[in-house]
Image (cartoon, grey):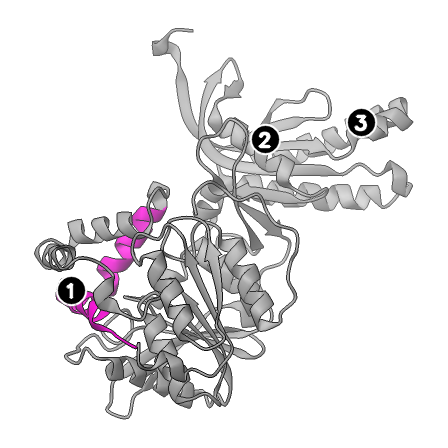
Amino acid sequence: MTTQEVKRKLTAILSADVKGYSRLMGEDEKGTVRTLNAYKEVMTGLIQHHHGRVVDSTGDNLMAEFASVVDAVECSVEIQKELETRNAGLPENRTMEFRIGINLGDVIEEEGRIYGDGVNIAARIESLSEAGGVCISGSAYDFLGKKLSLGYEYLGEHTVKNIEKAVRVYRVLSEPEPRHMEQQIRFCATPDGVRVAYSTVGQGPAVVIVPGWISHLQLYAELPALRALRGKLARNHTLVAYDKYGCGLSERSRTDFSLESELRPLEAVVDHLKLRRFALWGISQSGAVAAAYAAEHPRRVSHLILYGAYARGEAIAADELKLGLKSLIRAHWGMGSKTLADLFLPGIDEASIRWFTRLQREAATPEMAAQLMDLTYSLNVVDLLPKVRVPTLVMHRRGDRAIPFQLGREMAAMIPGARFVQLEGNIHLPFFGNVDSIGRTMAEFLGDPVDITPSKQGKTG
């Protein structure tokens, strides 16, 4: 086949195989083949019904392609439901359960067969699926959005054989998330009249998330990894987040850039929701704000969680770099947002870079972003940290390029009894990279049930 004859296309690939096929064959070859052929006939019929076509069906494997990832996922769910019904009529040791993996990717087509990384990724994802289950890739998940009435559980980034970049993987759930797991956005106001947008999700004791440098509640809700981490925490807690003063859906007009002006929206949200006692999570710039609030209100804060935080903003970077970043943001917000995305998310995939670049540009004007960057460098809570008297967890990634690792360690040392956890990786935002380890560490600290089965994390972190 010459280069001119290569036919490429974007397609949804369904890959399936039987869990425990060798055992079944070893115990009863004829019975296994009979059941396999019957089940494949059912699967082929459903694939055709959902506008797909089978491209390979050797041994216990079956591969199909669909023009629509929606059709592929709908078909896979229907297949598993039908096979579950059929298995109910078999002895337990003779049930035949398929694992299904779906990927949306580029393939090469030749004489009705398909090849390439798109196919390989689907097969690797299939191997991560549980018996009777369906897993999909991040590319398939991103396309699906809310097109189907299904739920999804983020399983982390996985390094798979012969694929250079880690692959995001999601488990398909047969039911959508319950109502209390959907983000609800409302508004309140500070005593001086500043409008603050806040959101709630989940149920149980509250965890208040203080926004970092900039924020946008609606755009955060689009990020799969953030929704996944939030979903796991929201099983046991009501998560309360709010947009930073000057950003997102909160009041955009702002002239006061001080620690006090950061504390007022936090106090307003907490008072508005009548939260008597809650955990407080500060990320990056907001770590200083959260620590200051905890020092002032030790009876209201049950746990203090700090991630990628610092006590002395002036120590983050050299003065020349600070000035250069602020000048770039003001002069060319597009280039500035891309530069900051590279700084915060080194080595991450292009889709994530585009999302974060968009988040920054839609969350704040160039001037507001520059002013908030200046606030980052001016915050200093060194004198307040020794006054913190609540259980404190400090997490920091060792290779963090935005907030140096030693500043997180220094912050933990200043808080009496604080627990410091060193995380691997160089990504600044907690919603990318080794998200599972962050979620497990937080759950353990908060006294929640912890999933002790780690997923195979990708290389980025």
- Relative to residue 160, is residue 30 depicted above or below? above
Name the residue rendered at 39%, 81% in the picture: 386
Q: Which residue is mark 1?
A: 370
- Relative to residue 163, is residue 190 depicted above or below? below
Q: Is 384 covered by the magenta stretch?
A: no
Q: Which residue is mark 2?
A: 123
**Quarter assignment of residue 55:** top right
Q: CA distance from mark 3 to mark 1?
A: 62 Å
Q: Which residue is mark 3?
A: 22
Q: What amino acid type should be assigned to the residue bearing mark 1? A: Ala
Foreground: disc 2 or disc 1: 1
What is the crowding at mark 3: few (fewer than 14 residues within 10 Å), some, or many (at least 20)? few
Residue nearest the observer in this picture, 398 or 150: 398
What is the crowding at mark 1: few (fewer than 14 residues within 10 Å), some, or many (at least 20)? many
- Relative to residue 380, is residue 19 depicted above or below? above
Magenta region, main secondary structure: helix
**Secondary structure of residue under mark 1:** helix
**Residue 153 location, x and y as percent?**
57, 54
Name the residue rendered at 63%, 40% in the picture: 128
Q: What amino acid type should be assigned to the residue bearing mark 2? A: Ala
Name the residue rendered at 67%, 45% in the picture: 133
**Quarter assignment of residue 135:** top right
Q: Earlier in the sequence, mark 2 or mark 1?
A: 2
What is the crowding at mark 2: few (fewer than 14 residues within 10 Å), some, or many (at least 20)? many
**Residue 372 location, x and y as percent?**
20, 69
Q: Which residues are magenta?
A: 352-381
